[in-house]
Amino acid sequence: MKNQNFNKGLTLTALGSFWWGAIGVIYFKYISFAGPIEVVIHRCVWTSVILIISTFYFSKWNIFFEIIANKKKLVWLFFSGLLIFINWATWIYAVGTERIIDASFGYFIMPILSVFLGYIFYNEKINKMRMLSIILVLISILFLLLVNFNSIPWVGIIVALSWGFYNLLRKKVNVDTDVGLLIESLFILPFALFAFYLIFQNNLNDFSLATPSLMLIFMLAGPMTVIPLFLYVRGVELCGLGPTGMIFYITPTLQFILGFFYYNEAFSYEKSLSFILIWIAVIIYLKDLYENN
């Protein structure tokens, strides 16, 4: 039974990672014609709607109100909500402006960055292999900084930092992933609705009753966000952080492949050398992760 749960966890995590790395990229690229602002608005709004439905379905309102009653947790979730908004907005901007490869850079270094943040803020121990991974990541960024400042994948760095600090705060709050995300989404929701009102008032919206099929496509932004999250988190629960940490690299690998081979994004010589350093760092990190789990 234990092996069965472990294998089920690996499958769910792989599906979640595949969804983020391929299905999510293709979907958000498809609706990128609406512009990053409207796409981010739809992601915020329909994610909130889906999470409200799921909270009813799984009968988690008691957990929701317990968190609401805790002012300290609410403050932390406000800031984590701000970070997840920055992450979503930056990633959608990357997809819509042919910077998918740069975004993949961020997801390649994110687990390694999380190890470094855990070391700084929670005094978590780092062995020599993981320290070497961190040093290689820093060298790859410094290399781009010294060779060509404009070639630094700032989008990827913002994606990695926002997601890394988001995980850091969520670890501190320690609440159910979906209920916590619902509260974060509700913090963002009024601003998203106000921004949509401004877009609608200026006739800049692509979401319209005149095109019901397009409306449905935009509404899919909610499931596209929540479904892979549920799959991945359930996988973590069944087989642990170590194995899922390794499987997560399906996401940036598929993003890179799509960006380079399918969407024909530019990939400079400087970035290729930097990515080689990143991939070496990832291999070292995954080897250590495998040997210590």
Image: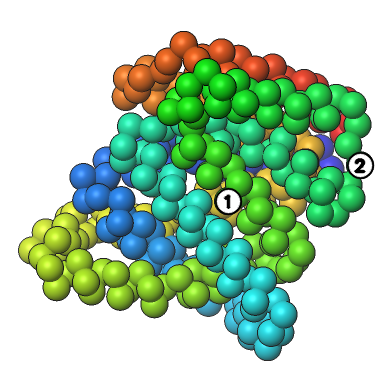
Secondary element at tag 1: helix
Q: Dot 2: within a 10 Å radius of its alpha carbon, few (fewer than 14), some, or many (20 or more) residues? A: few
Picture coordinates of residue 260, whole percent (x, y): 39, 20
Q: Which mark is residue 162?
A: 1
Q: Which mark is residue 100?
A: none
Determine the image quadrant of residue 30.
top left
**Residue at 60% over, 14% down:** 276
* 18 on left or right of 60: left
Picture coordinates of residue 160, whole percent (x, y): 59, 42
What whole-number distance in Å separates the C-alpha atoms at marks 1 and 2?
22 Å
Q: Dot 1: within a 10 Å radius of its alpha carbon, few (fewer than 14), some, or many (20 or more) residues? A: many
Q: Amino acid at mark 2?
A: Lys
Quarter of the image that includes the C terminus: top right
Picture coordinates of residue 90, whole percent (x, y): 43, 48
Q: Which mark is residue 125?
A: 2
Residue 11 visible in the displayed image = no
Mark 1 touches mark 2? (CB < 8 Å): no
Q: Amino acid at mark 1?
A: Ser
